[in-house]
Amino acid sequence: MSADPATTRKGLWSAAATLLATSSTLVCCALPALLVALGAGAALSALVAAAPQVVWLSEHKEALFGVCGAALVLSGAVQWQQRSAPCPVEPHLRRACMRTRAAARRLYAASVATYLVGGWFAFVQPLLA
């Protein structure tokens, strides 16, 4: 049984898109907190001056985390569905298929870690200060 190459890459693309989406949680919440903690308020001011969208993301962090959380759930569902999809029988195509799955799992794990770090700085850390 041979799998469609587009199907084998589906998990990789969804994980990459989720990593991109969850990276916005770092920009919104973790990066400003890190800059302030390091005493780099001037760098934060320069960042806000160069990219004023950071302020908008911070003001709408609940919606941002909701959308990113939904993206994580959907990407996780794709990862789960693709875990046992057939790979091609040809050895070199099978290896490529398995490498793509492994890369998708790593990207998804990085997305979850990014989301959790952003969530820590957005919601937990302010409660501890």
Image: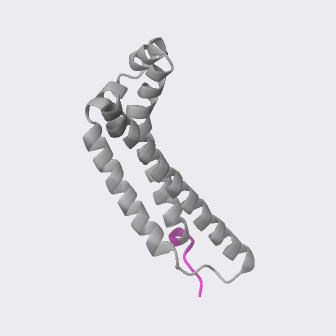
The C terminus lies in which quarter of the figure?
top left
Q: Position of residue 34 (x, y in %)?
A: 47, 27
Res. 63 in view: yes
* Residue 24 makes an appearance in the image: no
6 left or right of 55 in image: right
Quadrant of residue 24 within the rendered picture: top left
Question: In the image, is 127 to the left or to the right of 109?
Answer: left
Q: State which region is magenta.
A: 1-7
Q: Tell me where residue 39 appears, x and y as whole percent.
A: 49, 15
- Which residue does the image show at 55% across and 70% down from the upper left? 8
- Give the residue furthest to the top: 42
Q: List x then y, in percent, for residue 82.
A: 49, 73
Along the viewing direction, whichever of 6 and 105 lies nearer the viewer: 105
Residue with the most extreme front position: 128
Residue at 36 percent across and 55 percent down: it is 71
Residue 111, compared with residue 117, is above or below; it is below
